[in-house]
Image (cartoon, rainbow, N blue to C red):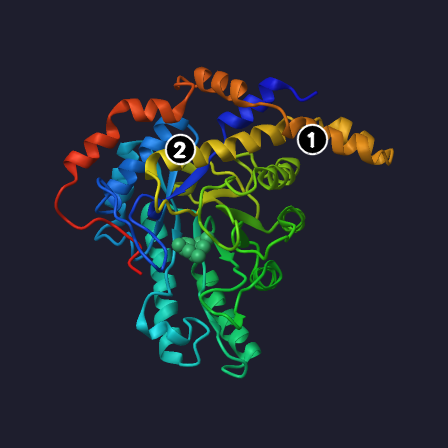
Amino acid sequence: MPDLTAVKDALKNHQIELPSWAFGNSGTRFKVFGQPGVPRNPFEKADDAAQVHKYTGVAPTMAVHIPWDKTDDYAVLAAHAHEAGIRIGAVNSNVFQDDDYKLGSVCNPDPRVRKKALAHLLECVDIMDATGSRDLKLWFADGTNYPGQDDITARQDRLAEALRAVYERLGDDQRMLLEYKLFEPSFYTTDVPDWGTSLLHCLALGPKAQVVVDTGHHAPGVNIEFIVAMLLAAGRLGGFDFNSRFYADDDLMVGAADPFQLFRILHEVVKAGGLYPGQTLGITARSAAAAAQPKSPPVAFMLDQCHNIEPKIPAQIRSVMNVQEATAKALLIDISALRDAQLAGDVLAANAVLMDAYNTDVRPLLARLRDEMGLAPDPVAAYLASGYGEKIISERTGGSPAGWGA
Ligand code: RM4
Ligand code: MN
């Protein structure tokens, strides 16, 4: 049986990163429903993210998205986040919301547009230097809508060239995470549609280039844990963008559509040791500044979500708890019993070991864990009782609420 103290230690050290954009207004292409009290700038987003960390104890960083979180001095933003009790995490680039990018960004046939997109990506690395962030997350909306519109391999060459330039700009302790997505906004070809394409680029670049798996970015029925296992084995799983996927990429709360899949994914991560801070997959050296930062796990556990109809801060708390519950269950798998059954070819016994862990109610264990961490046993209830939600509604009047600017 797994050692409960070790399970609790792993859960105490777990780090789940929140997306700044989860706190702003969001919606679908049909309608954005505004909510009262949403942040008006990245500083207020950091304040809200800090609330999630305050009640869960395992969400110490907030990813930013440029230009949604544009500010004059990123060191000031980092200091503000620190003051609020968190740090700035991954920097997400945005080369999909400018008229110039109609035919793509770094894959665009026009060299002028490619140059502009690359300049933005390099600016994001400057921001990482100022915030002390380890990871640059790259997602490209590039692709084509019609057969013959552009040359598939020429676009790959342009992509490789831009990625190389970004890679060369990274510090020793920085990484770039290349995200893939099956389709949308392009409908015929997508330039980074799958983990194979992302991995090929990363392998060509070097160890600081890693694949990021956004759970929503797959076709229905894809076995995501298999992809995760392969990437972990190759030392190239840089992180996750967790969310759900009912029919396609919905950015709803992680674990909403399929908590069992989340558990299966986390089993692969736990088995490979991807949970534990201090391991430095792919990083060759640590600068003094980075060494002074609290250590991050080799696999970044990021949320990539939007809360269109539900209140945002409690939804982020719930999402963190969903990842935490699935992780706890994965940690409870009796690995030696599983291995024995597997090696004996006992199909049913092996499956039973996995299901026993999955069917365990881990909520009492997590309540005890929170108690040991000096937290309330029910984070959502504690947040709702705190009055913070009412406070931001009354205080945040005037100005424009933050949104994703689509
Ligand atoms: C994209 C992609 C990116 C995220 C944006 C908001 O679909 O998943 O990771 O930064 O959405
Ligand atoms: Mn994503």
User: How far from the left and from the top, in percent, is residue 185?
Assistant: 44, 66
Q: At label 1, which amino acid type do we have?
A: Met
Q: Nearer the viewer, residue 263 or 59?
A: 263
The N terminus - image quarter: top right
**On the rendered structure, is 114 left or right of 397?**
right
373 relative to 16, above or below: above
Question: Quarter-wise, where is residue 44 in the image?
Answer: top left
What residue sits right under mark 1 in the picture? Answer: 355
Q: Is mark 2 within 8 Å of ligand 2?
A: no
| Residue at the outermost front position | 30
Residue pictured at 51% horizontal, 55% vertical: 248
Give the mark, 1 or 2, whose residue is nearer the N terminus: 2
Label drawn at residue 136: none
Compared with residue 316, is residue 245 higher up or lower down, i.e. above or below?
A: below
Is label 1 within 8 A of ligand 2 (CB to nearest ligand atom)?
A: no
- Residue assigned mark 2: 317
- Residue 64, horizontal then vertical, whole percent: 35, 49
Residue at 46% x, 44% y: name it. Answer: 302
Residue that extends furthest to the bottom in the rendered view of this protein:
148
Q: Nearer the viewer, residue 166 or 313?
A: 313
Q: Amino acid at mark 2?
A: Ile
Q: In the image, residue 84 lies at what x, y percent?
A: 28, 33
> Please, what secondary structure does the residue beneath circle 1 have?
helix
Q: Position of residue 252 (x, y in %)?
A: 44, 46
Query: 10 Å neighbourhood of mark 1: few (<14), some, or many (≥20)?
Result: some
